[in-house]
Amino acid sequence: MGVTISNHSEHVRILRIDRPPVNALDNPTMEAFGEAVDTAMQDSSVRVIVVTGAGEKAFAAGADLDELAVCDPEGGKKLVSGVKTIMGKLRQGTKPVIAAINGLAAGGGLELAMSCDIRVADGRAGLGLPEVTLGVLPGSGGTQMLPRLIGVGRALDMMLSGKIISAEEGFRLGLIDLVAGEAGALADALAMAEKLSANAPLAMAEIKALAYATLSQPLAQGFEMETDGFGRLCETQDRDEGIAAFKSRRKAVFQGK
């Protein structure tokens, strides 16, 4: 199957990695996922995207080892470059993306989760980048994203050991943003998505773009970019609606205009 797509509500779309038994990320699955992300980002009715894994075992267990085993140096570079391009669609897209980690997220699976904006994990989820045990490194962004999320020392501890950590430890380190309650990661992620989907789409897009852009920019330049973004929002209908709704003590109805 690769990826299954469904709408939870008018403004929330669910993308499920669906490749039994552990949702390994082979080329066809990642290509289908990239197309699904493109479609969701371009659909004006979609305001929030939730990414999860089918079944109960895994969010995504990483790269397909049969594909990895036949890679020469150029093939290996092509493999991870293609995955990075697809995962980049999540960060570069204008809409918030929430990962609902419903089981094991290892290797490329954790890199996929880290490419999402917010991570919600089941209490039973396992998280790790075990590529070193296979003689390679986390090549789909892991060596770059993990240190930015949890610090260099903690990231190196995870990557050099290849260990799998719990959701609770991931939350303590800052890798996980919310450990789900009894209802599970998907239910909690969808509840979060519904709340976000009620907010102004253009404002959310500006906030997301600024948060990522300024990671690689000096603070002063980040301040300038933030000022420009604020100015753009001041000419939107959503700004007018938000203020009018606040003054009238009613819920705002944003149109993304």
Image (spheres, rainbow, N blue to C red):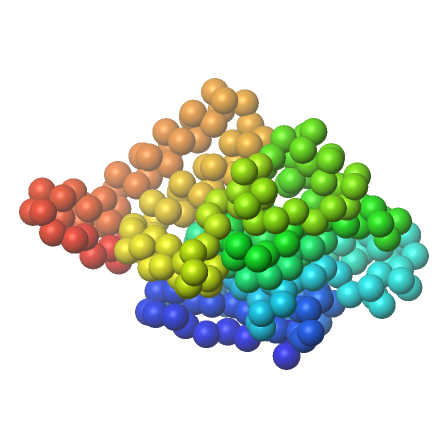
> Going 18% across and 52% down the picture, which residue do you hit?
252
> Going 69% across and 74% down the picture, which residue do you hit?
21
> Going 54% across and 38% down the picture, which residue do you hit?
172
Q: Residue at the top extreme?
A: 220
**Up/down of 31 relative to 109, above or below:** below
Q: Is residue 93 visible?
A: no
Quadrant assignment for the C terminus: bottom left
> Going 86% across and 53% down the picture, which residue do you hit?
134
Q: Nearer the viewer, residue 130 or 7?
A: 130
* Number of numbered discs: 0
Q: Nearer the viewer, residue 145 or 33?
A: 145
Taking the image as shown, residue 181 lies to the left or right of residue 28, namely: left
Q: Nearer the viewer, residue 172 or 5?
A: 172
Taking the image as shown, residue 214 lies to the left or right of residue 141, namely: left
**Up/down of 220 relative to 87, above or below:** above
Task: Name the spot of residue 41 as percent of width and height, x first.
Answer: 47, 61
Q: Is residue 150 visible?
A: yes
Task: Name the spot of residue 182 as percent of width and height, x first.
Answer: 43, 60
When asked about the image quadrant of residue 102, the answer is bottom right
When asked about the image quadrant of residue 256, the answer is bottom left
Task: Name the spot of residue 204 as percent of width and height, x first.
Answer: 37, 47
**Up/down of 210 relative to 141, above or below:** above
Taking the image as shown, residue 128 lies to the left or right of residue 8, namely: right
Quadrant assignment for the N terminus: bottom right
